[in-house]
Amino acid sequence: MKSIKQQFKPMMISFIPIIIIFGWIRGVYSPPGGEPIPLSFFGLHSWILIYIVSSIIYSLILRKILRVH
């Protein structure tokens, strides 16, 4: 429980700027007319969900390949 409390604060401090940066990037690189390009990946329609799922999958694969525990 102590380690979770120590990890939570830095995670929240880094999470807020990342969300702001990704929101800015989405606004800058959206197509003309303001309509975002719809993403569909196994029923997930949000870029953040695609990012989270793919990072978990790649992390598991790399851990198996590199034998990191």
Image (spheres, rainbow, N blue to C red):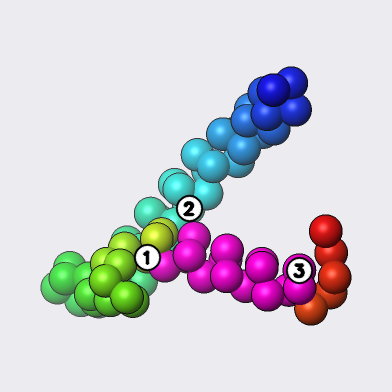
Please rate how many residues cluster around mark 1, counting C-alpha atoms within 10 Å: few if below 14, some from 14 to 19, many from 20: some
In this rendering, the count of numbered labels is 3
Residue 47 — which label? 1
Quadrant in the rendering for residue 40: bottom left
Question: Label 3 amino acid?
Answer: Arg
- Mark 2 or mark 1: name the one nearer the start of the chain: 2
Quadrant in the rendering for residue 7: top right
Kindly report the distance in space between the C-alpha atoms of the residues bearing marks 2 and 3.
28 Å
Query: Residue 20 versus residue 15: which sits nearer the camera?
Result: 15
Residue 25 — which label? none
Kindly report the distance in space between the C-alpha atoms of the residues bearing marks 2 and 1.
14 Å
Q: Residue at x 56, y 34 (%)?
A: 12
| Residue identified by numbered label 3 | 63
- At mark 2, the secondary structure is helix
Q: Marks 2 and 1: which is nearer the front?
A: 1
Q: Is residue 55 magenta?
A: yes
Q: Residue 46: where, in percent of width, then height?
A: 31, 63
Magenta: main secondary structure equals helix
| Discs 2, 3 touching: Cβ within 8 Å | no
Q: Is residue 47 magenta?
A: no
| Residue identified by numbered label 2 | 21
Q: Residue at x 50, y 39 (%)?
A: 16
Question: Label 2 amino acid?
Answer: Ile
| Discs 2, 1 touching: Cβ within 8 Å | no
Q: Marks 3 and 1: which is nearer the front?
A: 3
Give the extent of the magenta segment. 50-64
Query: Residue 12 versus residue 53: which sits nearer the camera?
Result: 53
